Image (cartoon, grey):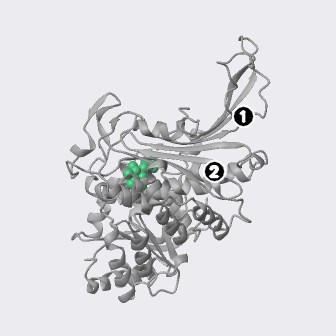
Amino acid sequence: MNTQPFKTAIALFGATGDLSSRKLLPSMFHLFQEGSLKDNFVIIAVGRRDFSDEDFREMAEESISSNKKLENLDGLGSFLQHVFYVQVDIAESSTYKILKDRFEELEAQFDTAGNRLFYLAMPPQYFTVITDNLRESGVTDTQGSKRLIIEKPFGRDYDSALALNNEITNTFDEHEIYRIDHYLGKEMVQNIEVIRFSNSMFEPLWNNHYISNIQITSSESLGVLDRGEYYERSGAVRDMFQNHLLQIVSLLGMEPPISLNSDDIRDEKIKVLKSLRRVGEKDVKRHFVRGQYDEGLVDGEAVPKYRDEENVADDSNTPTFIASRLFIDNFRWAGVPFYVRTGKRMKEKETKIVVEFKEVPKNLYYQAEEDDVLAKNLLVIRIQPDESITLHLNVKDYAGEKDTKEIKLSYTVAKQDLSRTVDAYENLIYDCLNGDSTNFTHQEELMNAWAFVDPVNKVWENSPAAFPNYQSGSSGPVKSTLLVSRDGFKWWDV
Ligand code: BG6
């Protein structure tokens, strides 16, 4: 917990939208409850609608009180006294004067030291209009710090991401830009570094001498819900793979940083993304599998196929599933495949990492019995829904007939620890207020991730697939199984 509450004024663009109501306002309220925000902060909600402060406060109150992760609503009345609303037409530069005046008036009233945070919970087409207008109307001229939080997607390929960044950096320097990847706010994702670098037993084994392959699965049972329009433009590659999953790959693959300083950590992550073996267009088929969900049963309920979802084309070629086989071409990882998959409408909601270790150099057991083998040593890091770490080992089978049996050493994060924050967003907003950009995507990470996925998108967008090719409620297309089995491995269902 922060002992010094932050002094800050937050302009929340898209304040009446879904993200603000489900995640951002509850997270900010919880930061208030636990003392990180106290007397010297204001939230200026920015929106198109003609609302008064009171109208918006009512809306915020409703969003916050319907959040199930909050244990109580103590202090909600006082929190709302720090919340204000301004009506701005974001495309109209003259209206930004209202925001500037409001900042100045409220900063004086709440003594926020001129620190301004601009949170754009907005579709990406508005990013540069807003940052340009903020600069031109002088809203970003402040005595304190100025910071920008933006939500993905940051561009839709390498070129557009570069252009976007060039525009934004006219107003904000790289160190002032906080690109949200909410997976980096998840406790268990942050735990990857701790597990690796605070235990002496993993690091010596964390390489191609002892690890045979690493698997990352992020499956969702939900479909695209009401986001068909967005999803049609994005698909699984841009929605999950290019950002959340490649971030996890870089945390698993990075070298130990020289310190926990944000730049030191991000330097190491960037190196991993740079070392990803680029897959040329002709090799996409060998390394990537795409899928789109058909109708089926999820949790016992019949669900429609992707092409029947709202705002989705009848002949949509958008992948809702991707499986891939990646290689990090450096000394540590040469030859170790990283299998990464994500999909919507799969059998369950789950994000996990499985590190599979190589077999012992000589198996002294089961030499005669062909069917019996030693269990594989696995390290399973479960990110959600439960958060746990499990190590699969072999021990003597005292009671049974075999020589050995598999056991699992497991640690599950305790419930009281889980409820410390309302959401990954709370961690990230806290970090940004604290000026800590470790858990945000650096421009170079972004560009390397796009450079890696661009050929895949290009090939897939130019060749219609035989969709749908997996049933809702399944584990994805058959070809995804083959991608792994061809190398002599299997997706671990653990
Ligand atoms: C978002 C994607 O970034 O992540 C969504 O846009 C996806 O499509 C979501 O459902 C998954 O996040 P989580 O935290 O529920 O795993």
The reply to whether residue 4 is in sight is yes
For image coordinates 72% across by 14% down, the residue present is 402
> Left or right: where does residue 372 sit relative to residue 490?
right
C-alpha distance separating marks 1 and 2 = 23 Å
In this view of the protein, which residue sits in the foreground, 369 or 83? 369
The quarter holding residue 466 reads top left
Question: Quick one: label 1, few (<14), some, or many (20+) residues within 10 Å?
Answer: some
> Left or right: where does residue 149 sit relative to residue 268?
left
The quarter holding residue 467 reads top left
Expressed as whole percent of the image width and height from the top left, the position of residue 312 reads 23, 51
Question: Quick one: label 2, few (<14), some, or many (20+) residues within 10 Å?
Answer: some
For image coordinates 63% across by 58% down, the residue present is 329
- Identity of the amino acid at label 1? Glu
Q: Is residue 92 above or below residue 440?
A: below
In this view of the protein, which residue sits in the foreground, 150 or 317? 317
Q: In this view, does 96 lie above or below 71?
A: below
The reply to whether residue 182 is in sight is no
Q: Which residue is label 2 attached to?
A: 192
For image coordinates 30% across by 63% down, the residue present is 16
In this view of the protein, which residue sits in the foreground, 165 or 401? 401
The quarter holding residue 270 reads bottom right
Q: Which residue is label 1 attached to?
A: 359
Expressed as whole percent of the image width and height from the top left, the position of residue 276 reads 57, 59
For image coordinates 70% across by 59% down, the residue present is 255
Q: Is residue 425 above or below residue 487?
A: below
Q: What element carries label 2?
A: helix
- Identity of the amino acid at label 2? Ile
> Left or right: where does residue 235 sit relative to residue 333?
left
Q: What element carries label 1?
A: loop
Quadrant of the frame with the N terminus: bottom right
Expressed as whole percent of the image width and height from the top left, the position of residue 280 reads 48, 60
